[in-house]
Amino acid sequence: MSGERGAAGQAVPPRAVDREDRTEPLGAAPWPATPDADSLAPAARPTALTRPGEPERRVQAGTSRSQNQAANRAATLAPTGRRPHTSAAAPLRPSGRQRTPPPPVRFDLTPGRPDLSAFPRSRWLAAYRAALQAVPHHALTYPDPGGVAELRAELAAYLGRVRAAHAEAGQVVIMNGVALGLSSAVRSLVASGRTTLAVEDPTSDRQLPMLAATGARIVRVPVDDGGLDVAALARTGASAVLVTPAHQYPTGVVLACERRAALVDWARATGALIIEDDYDAEFRYDCEPVGCLQGIAPGRTVLLGSVSKALAPGMRLGWAVAPPWMAADLRGHRELSDLGGPVLDQHAFARLLADGAYDRHLRAMRRRYRGRRDALVEALAAHVPDAVVRGISAGVHLYLELPPGTSETAVVEVAAESGVRVCGARGMWNREQGRPALVLGYAALTECGLREAARILAAAITRARS
C-alpha cells in the first residue's frame, strides 16, 4: 500500500505486481517482459522497437537515453496488437487541467483538538499492564453492556467529587464517547414519542447532522452573554434540550445562575429532559468550574462526558449519568447495537481514576493549556486590537469576534493561503450571528507557535479587509 512505512520511517516501495494479479481480457496475449535499457550492456541495448505484426521503428542515433527508456516503457505497457498512443518523441501530456496543490499547513488552529503529544503513555501502559495482571479470565467474556462495574463505580465517585454530580454506579453507562451517548439518548426520546429537541444557537455544526439522523425535530434556541435563553426555550414546546452550560460551545460563555435555576424549573414543570454536554469542564483556568446541572436535577438530566479532551478522542471512551429509566434504555441500546465496549480499556481507565494518575495528568494539562490560551490572547490583542475574545478562560478553544466589516470567509481563505488553518463560526449559527467570528483551537500548538500564528492571522485579516 502507498501509505506503508519502513522501520526507519522511509516509504516502502509498492510491491511488484505478479502476472497472476494483472487483469487482461480473455484471449489476450501476455504482456511482453522487456528489460530496462539501462540494465543492458551498450552493445546489447535495443536500437529498434518492434512488436509482433508491426513494422520495425528505428530509433535515431541522437536519441537520448531517457527517450529510449520512454519508448521501451510505451512498447512494454501497450497491449499486444495495439499501437502505443505516444512515441519517444512525444511525451505524455496531462489529460486534464492540473490543480494547484493547497499550501502546506504550518499552524492548525482547528477547534476541539487536545495536545495528543501529551497523552500519558507511561501511565496508561502501567494501568493497562496492571489490568491485564488483575482481570480474571472470565471477565474477558462479553461485557455488561452498561460497562465494567469497577469503572462505573470509580466514575460515580470521581464525578461526584469533581463535578458535584449526584451519581450512583447504576446510573452510569459507559459509551463510545459523547457522540454515542447523545445519539442514543435522543433516539430513546424519539422512540417514546418525545420528538422535539431544542439545541443552542450557535452550536457545534458537527453534531447537527448526527442529531438529524435520530429522527428528532430540531429547534434552535438563542444564546447570549448569559447562556441559553430559557424564556425562548419555553416557547418552543420542546420535550428535551441539549446544553453546554459550563462552557458554551462555541461562544465560551457560562450559563448564568438565574438561568440554571430557570432551566431546571422548566424541566420539572414540563417533564422535559436536559441533556448536559460536559465536554471540557475539567479545564477552567480562572477559578473553580461551576458544578454540573445533573447535581441539581438528577431525575431530569443526562450528564455526558468523555476523555476526548483530557486524554485523546481516539480512545472513544465516554459515559452517561442518567435517570434510572434512561440508563436502562441506554444499556438496552448498547446491548442491541454493539454488546458493550472494550473491557481492558475500561479496567485501565478505572485504575487511572483510582490511583490519582488521571487527576495528576489533568493538573499538568491545565497549566499547559492556560499558558497557551494566555499566549494566544495576548498575541491577538497586540496584532488585532479591534478583535474581541469572548467567553471565559476555559477549555481548548476560544471565540474571536473579527473587526466589524470583515469578511469571515475571506479571512479563512487568506489565512489558509498563508499556512494558518482556522474555522469560521458562520456554519454554527442558525440566526444572524452579528459580528463575523473565528473559533480557534489552541491546545495542540506551542506558545511560540501560537504567537506566530496570531501574527500571520492578523496579516490575513488586514488583507481580507483591504
Image (tube, rainbow, N blue to C red):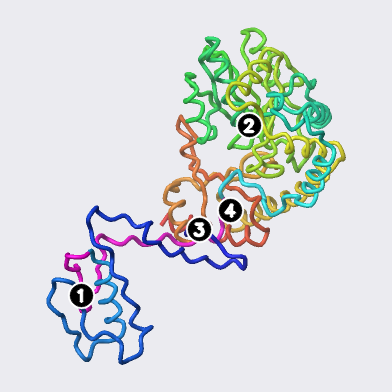
Secondary structure type for disc 1: loop
Mark-to-mark CA distance, 3 and 2: 31 Å
Secondary structure type for disc 2: helix
Mark-to-mark CA distance, 4 and 2: 36 Å
> Is 198 placed left or right of 155 in the picture?
left
Q: Write the residue at 46% across / 51% down.
A: 412
Q: For the C terminus, which image quadrant?
A: bottom left
Q: Which residue is mark 3?
A: 3
Residue sitting nearer the eye, 352 or 372: 352
Q: Is residue 103 magenta?
A: yes
- Amino acid residing under circle 3: Gly
Q: Earlier in the sequence, mark 3 or mark 4?
A: 3
- Amino acid residing under circle 2: Val
The percent coordinates of residue 422 (x first, y second) are 52, 50
Mark-to-mark CA distance, 3 and 4: 44 Å
Q: Write the residue at 74% across / 17% down.
A: 298
Q: Are marks 4 and 1 in contact (CB under 8 Å)?
A: no
Residue sitting nearer the eye, 445 or 287: 445
**194 above or below 377?**
above
Secondary structure type for disc 4: loop
Question: Which quadrant holds residue 257?
Answer: top right
Q: Earlier in the sequence, mark 1 or mark 3?
A: 3
* Secondary structure, magenta segment, majority class: loop
Q: Which residue is mark 1?
A: 87
Q: Which residues are magenta?
A: 80-109
Q: Local crowd at mark 3 within 10 Å, few (<14), some, or many (≥20)?
A: few
Q: Earlier in the sequence, mark 4 or mark 2?
A: 2
- Amino acid residing under circle 4: Pro
Q: Which residue is mark 2?
A: 178
The residue mark sitting in front, 4 or 2, is 2
Q: Which residue is mark 4?
A: 385
